[in-house]
Image: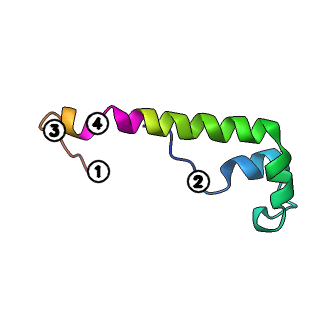
Amino acid sequence: MGYILAPYGFGYRTHGAAHKAEDDSEFFKKDKKLRGEVEGVVNNVVETMALDLEKRLSGKITCVSE
């Protein structure tokens, strides 16, 4: 649905490849842009889960494999 991101996707894009997310947590804690983006993603995931799409779309979706 477009809201699942690779681990550290924001951190890499925001901070650069020269820094490891595991070693530079202070940067991530202080970065307002990063915090806002993460909060937005979390809110979108929670709102999508609240829609209970699995139940509402049961029987209407066909699994496709290529």
Q: CA distance from mark 1 to mark 3?
A: 22 Å
Q: Residue placed at 80% from the left, 60% from the top?
A: 25
Measured from the top left, where is residue 32 in percent x and y? 81, 37
Q: Residue placed at 21% from the left, 46% from the top?
A: 63
Within the magenta stretch, is there residue 53?
Answer: yes
Residue type, mark 2 in image: Ala
Which tag is nearer the camera, tag 1 or tag 3?
A: 3
Quadrant of the drawing holding the N terminus: top left
Q: CA distance from mark 3 to mark 2?
A: 28 Å
Q: Are marks 4 and 3 in contact (CB under 8 Å)?
A: no
For the magenta stretch, what is the residue range? 48-54
What residue is pinned by disc 4? Answer: 52
Q: Residue placed at 51% from the left, 46% from the top?
A: 4
What residue is pinned by disc 2? Answer: 6
Q: CA distance from mark 4 to mark 2?
A: 23 Å
Q: Earlier in the sequence, mark 2 or mark 1?
A: 2
SS of the residue under disc 3: loop
Against 16, residue 41 (above or below) is: above
Q: Earlier in the sequence, mark 4 or mark 3?
A: 4
Residue type, mark 3 in image: Ser
Q: Earlier in the sequence, mark 1 or mark 4?
A: 4
What residue is pinned by disc 1? Answer: 66
Q: 12 left or right of 43?
A: right
What residue is pinned by disc 3? Answer: 58
Which tag is nearer the camera, tag 1 or tag 4?
A: 4
Closer-to-camera residue (17/27): 27
Residue type, mark 4 in image: Asp
